[in-house]
Amino acid sequence: MKDRPDLYRKFDPNFGLVKKIYPVLITYDKAYSAIGVNEYINKKTPRIKKKLLGYFKAELNHAIRIGDYDIQKSVIIDIDTLIMYSLLLKKQQLDLFDLIDEYFSKSDPDEPNLSSFYTFMIDNHSLDVQGEEFIKLLYGDILEED
């Protein structure tokens, strides 16, 4: 599988085109949205980057060029935040990569970023009531009439 970039492209047409890697930890536990948790994780980012590059070298060395990638800071996102914004993400009114970049750009580089991604989203991207379209997106298969 190491020498098969065509196989990777079969499952991901953007394989080989990606220049940024976003380490994202998606959780079900709101405790990870507590003040300072994401900052703590980012203090571990150099270790995370080292492991990712080690993986690339071991598994994908012949399929991609390792030096071409910019590994971003890690971010913790709880699943509830993704669900709340799922309709806007699906409609491409919001872009997850842009939101992550914005989250990190809003913080002062000389100060720790203690707010969670959830707090950032609530403070910067308020939601209007999403109504019936949102309900159909989440529960469409269950609510379909036979």
Image (cartoon, rainbow, N blue to C red):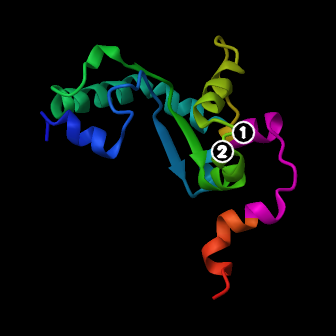
Amino acid of disc 1: Gln
The amino acid on which the numbered mark 2 sits, given as a three-letter code, is Leu
Residue 16's x, y, as percent?
Answer: 32, 27
State the quadrant of the C terminus: bottom right
Could you tell me residue 128's position as x and y percent? 87, 49
Position of residue 61 measured from the top left corner of the image (x, y, whole percent): 17, 26
Q: Residue furthest top?
A: 110
Element type where label 2 sits in the image: helix
Question: For residue 139, what is the image quadrant?
Answer: bottom right
In the image, the segment drawn in magenta is: 118-134
Asked whether disc 1 touches disc 2, contact meaning CB atoms under 8 Å apart, the reply is yes
Q: Residue at x 50, y 31 (%)?
A: 74
Judged from this view, the residue extending furthest toward the bottom is 146
Disc 1 residue crowd, few under 14, some 14–19, many 20+, Cα 10 Å: few
Residue under circle 1?
93
Q: Main secondary structure of the magenta part?
A: helix
